[in-house]
Amino acid sequence: MIVTDVFSLGVALMIPMLWAAYGETLMEKAGVLNVGIEGVMLVGAFSAALGVSYGGGIYAGLGFAIVAGLISGAVLALLYVRLGTDQIVTGIMFNIFAFGLTTTLAVEYVTATRVTSFPQFEIPGLAEIPFFGDVFFSHNVLVYAAFLAAPLVFYVLHRTWYGLYARASSEYPRAAEAAGLDVWRLRYAAVVAGCVMTSIGGVALFSSSGGFVSGLTDGRGFIALAIVILARWNPYWIVAASLLFGVSEALQFQADRLGPLGDVPPDLLVMIPYVVTILAVVLARASRYPPAVGVPYRPSSKAS
Amino acid sequence: MATPREAVHPAPGSPPGVPPAASLRGRSSPLVRLLIALAATVAIFSALIAALGVNPVDAFNAFWDGSVGSKFSLGQTVMIASLLACTGLAAAIPFQAHLWNVGGEGQLWAGAVAAVALALELPDGLPDWLAITITVLGACLAGALWGFIPGILKATVNANEVITCLMLVFIGIALGNYAISTLFPSQSNQTESVPFERLLPNIWEGTLVTAGALLALGAVLIAIVLMTGTSLGFQIRAVGLNRNTARISGMRTGRVIVLAMVIGGAFGGLAGAIAVLGINGAVVAGFSANFGFLGIAVALVARLKPLWIVPSALLFAALRTGSSGLQAQTGISATVGEILVTVLVIMLLAVGVIRLRYAEAAQ
Amino acid sequence: MASVPAVRMTGITKAYGATVANDGVDFELIPGEIHVLLGENGAGKTTLMGILFGMVIPDAGEVRLGDEAVSFGSPQDALDRGIGMVHQHFMLVQDFTVAENVVLGSVSPFDLMFRRAAIEGTVAEAAERFDMDIDVGARIRDLPIDTQQRVEILKLLYRGARILILDEPTSSLGPAQIEALFSGLKQLRDAGHSIVMVTHKLGEVMELADRVTVLKAGRSATTVGKGEFDERSLARAMTGHDLPELPPPTGAEAGREPLLRVRDLVVHAGARLHAVHGVSFDLHPGEILGVAGVEGNGQRELLDALAGVSAIEAGNVEVGGRDMTGASPRRLREAGLSVIHEDRHGWGLVLDMSLADNLGLAEVATGAASSHGFVRRRRLKARARELLEEYDVRPANPDALALSLSGGNQQKVVLARELANEPSVLIAANPASGLDVGAADYVHRRLLDVSKEDRAVLLISHDLDELLKLSDRILVLHRGRILYQAPIREVSMDVLAMAMAGSAPSQGNGDGAAVGSEDM
């Protein structure tokens, strides 16, 4: 059935953006806006390709990507938090840097396409449910983990002391400082953890694309930025929004079966997710970042 | 909507009139910090080059040859600088209004597509100078449209312009690919070529420098006059430094925002025209090595001042053509140039030599 | 009884660039006292206390707690030693609940036990123990200002603070709330806490202080004990001179066409606080109409609506007889309305622009300063020079950046710009906040001048003294409604105070609706 196929593909395609959106949520909910999300994702995908190229299989790729996420996170944390550089510009520069780095190194170090993905397995019982079974329960482990991560992210943000403190840092960091909190340390943790999750999104992308090419992410990281703000930082809404974008991306691959859509040239179909993003951002009017997001914080005691 | 005013207060103990303290980086002089940034960049880059199996010294020689080592390469640098000056202006003007026009790349592509479409489709009988003029203006208009969309969305529904600009980048690139594959196809990975008479003429013998460089210079002059002399430029600055005060003083901030984005977009579109009419003669797949995004770096290093965009663009262009030289002589992919450039900019940001000054108020 | 001082600060020096905030200041706090730190705005009081609380690192000097020398690197250090501070602008996260704000920072981030119900229970218990009536599950943004202040104090007590610093705690409160606060502070003192209250208001000192230290221009001028001071001597110690009295308000002649007419104005109706729910008043030529009220009762919304910056949901506004409801700031300005906003840095000036540019903002906006789209810079500068001289701004340099000026001079620049418009109606909100006595006096005189010239001033202020000094008529705003209106000579302070706290007078002035005094 067309609809099932579109949605099933949509679920597969949404996963990279979903992981990246989780990561970005953690960061923004501590007060850091990471426009470099695209670059982090790309480095993650590249690292997975590296791991696979060195014969370790997909799980080695995952390991490499997690390490890459830790490193990206450390670098970005240093820039965004400790040095207080302008977050948007630094993020954009990081994206270009990541693009250049991965493209240059890929030529040397990534051996050619040997399609490697996570093994697929169906969840017994659930996979038999009509429609939902095919759509949701016949994927690989990274997909299932992504869905299970939603309550985990929610828990961390709203049911832990860390989450409370981090959110205070995104709303009113000076009040957090006055209460005795170390805003910088809270933000370091958020950036590193967030980059690791974003990197995992890169692995998912590598896995579903079957290989690494230059510029693989193609704007998915930026779409994740939109997802986060549309979903108002709620992990459950993030899942829903990611599905929307996943499906809009799936449309171009199933277009030939969708009547009039099949007549539209593929180069234009590619635009669908981006147009959908713009429309969504416009329609979801009252989206406003918490006051301190994107503003580097200078603790009073460290001011000269 | 009332802004959360509780989020904005000077650090306790700041005497009135004194802004919250100076940079985190202590009190070392800007020159020292600049040198640190340069040294770090060179070090990192050398390490990378060495890891790729090339002697860093050879690499730097190749760089020199590729950028300014000969009359020809100098010409190449000038042309790339023309592109970067335009994308630099595309970023700088809206940035002064505190609008993040990160969509220069998309505006570039939109302008390029418009340029090739007009150059190919305008009736044959038209005198060449007229055709070229219309084409250039059309490209600027296309870029302006690419800037108008994020601008109007920001002004009306407060849609985040970073996201809308970035989306339009990918839409612009897709449009370009569509032009190459379907609208004006040719045998190779580019659109049909623009007929010779409708290209910008060469102005420096022995090089590939065309009148595109003059267009870029003209753009810079227009930008200088705009920002220093006109009422609109004044209002753009005021809105950028403190939108609230600008508004309560009677400025039509919505209009200013849209105009700033439109002007920025137009400069981006101009870059597209220069690329098509002044460099490649067609829309070539992947012709832009992130020139739109690098324009942001150009603008920052120039501290958003149109006059300084010229040397800044030349610097970044040299880095770009240098890396082409590197590729020619050592075989390393030219994208390594983008690594160099971004590491440099990040280092400069890190030491605080370049930073954006704006009111810390949440908007 | 001679006791070891709880806190002793000696030789404290702190400079910010060229400005010396504290210059060799000594300060001492004895256990179980209320010690008032008095001084003008800008005298260095907040800096000194910031050092005690660990938010500011001194350049020189020593801080001792009891017998021990300490050096705080952050507020956490101070809190660990039992020192807490309530800032002038509350350090509360508006979207969080009371309980969440109180426990913020009290436990390590790695602690795994986080149960919302248990937390609220603990905080509610603490509130009861300290005799505070607070709904711990309420969001801060829904609470009135004095309750928010109680939350701030509770926060400190919950963390075990024995030494409490309060920075200008009465700046936005009405008389009834101030009384409640003072009696609460006295209770805490009697229970053994030591309290430092930072203020620039003389009247409060007399009521509350066991001892007073006066700071002047960054130096400790005097420290005196109970019975050793009176208002006059303190005033002299603070400023070094006496200021001539302002002429008393004359009261405008009624019956002339109002310059500003507001009818049934509704702004931000969805909110309970921070809204205007049907306000009507007239502003006559030659009068200063004062709008009194505790902060957070709709003054800001009223200001923003009249300035054309906020949407007006219902009602109308007429300026000079013409309907200006929903007009843009530009049209309002053309109609002769000028605004001195309460947020000088956020809405009054562009700090990073020069004085000439700041003074010319309105003219550039209307095009009066341009010809063919080009700004006439020389004209702007010349005009600026005139204005800077007329208003005695220092330095009178049109190229100086606005951020380099002191608060008083900055406010003069704002005044100059707004009055240059020759407005028939001037709306001034907290025009003297944060200014030293001299600058405040200047501003007040200018406002009086405006009213003398047969124009009108709407003065919205938290400072009751200021209102009483200047207004010909006063009205009280509470929860977005006018609860009381009277000409200055007929004002009863008791009724005024009650209206500010929410009890409408039985005669049915203004709106007339009797509102319960839930927030006392």
Image (cartoon, helix red, strand yellow):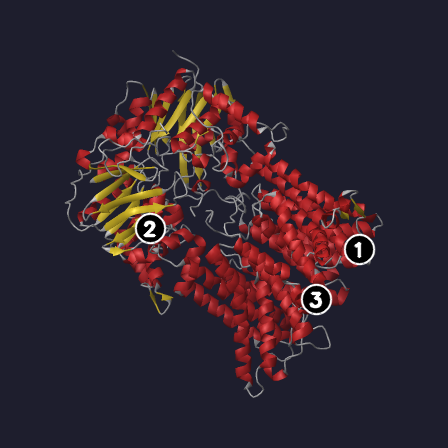
Position of residue C332 in the picture relative to residue B42 (left or right): left
**Element type at mark 1:** helix
Residue type, mark 1 in image: Tyr
| Pick the front one: A304 or C345 | C345
Q: Residue furthest bottom?
A: B125
> In the picture, which quadrant includes the C terminus of chain C?
top left
Q: Chain of mark 1?
A: A
Residue under pointer 3? B324
**Element type at mark 2:** loop
Other-residue count near label 1 (Cα within 10 Å), few / some / many at <14 / 14–19 / ≥20: some
Rendered image quadrant of residue B164: bottom right
Residue at mark 2 shares a chain with residue at mark 1: no
The image position of residue A186, as x and y in percent, is 60, 37
Q: Chain of mark 3?
A: B
B79 above or below A215? below
C223 above or below A15? above
Residue under pointer 2? C307
- Cα separation, mark 3 vs mark 2, equals 58 Å
Residue type, mark 2 in image: Ala
Tag nearer the camera, 3 or 2: 2
Number of the label disc, if any, that sits on residue B75? none
| Pick the front one: B326 or B169 | B169
Number of the label disc, if any, that sits on residue A109? 1
- Cα separation, mark 3 vs mark 1, equals 21 Å
Other-residue count near label 2 (Cα within 10 Å), few / some / many at <14 / 14–19 / ≥20: many
**Element type at mark 3:** helix
Residue B34 can be seen in this image: no
Residue type, mark 3 in image: Ser
Q: Residue furthest right?
A: A55
Other-residue count near label 3 (Cα within 10 Å), few / some / many at <14 / 14–19 / ≥20: many
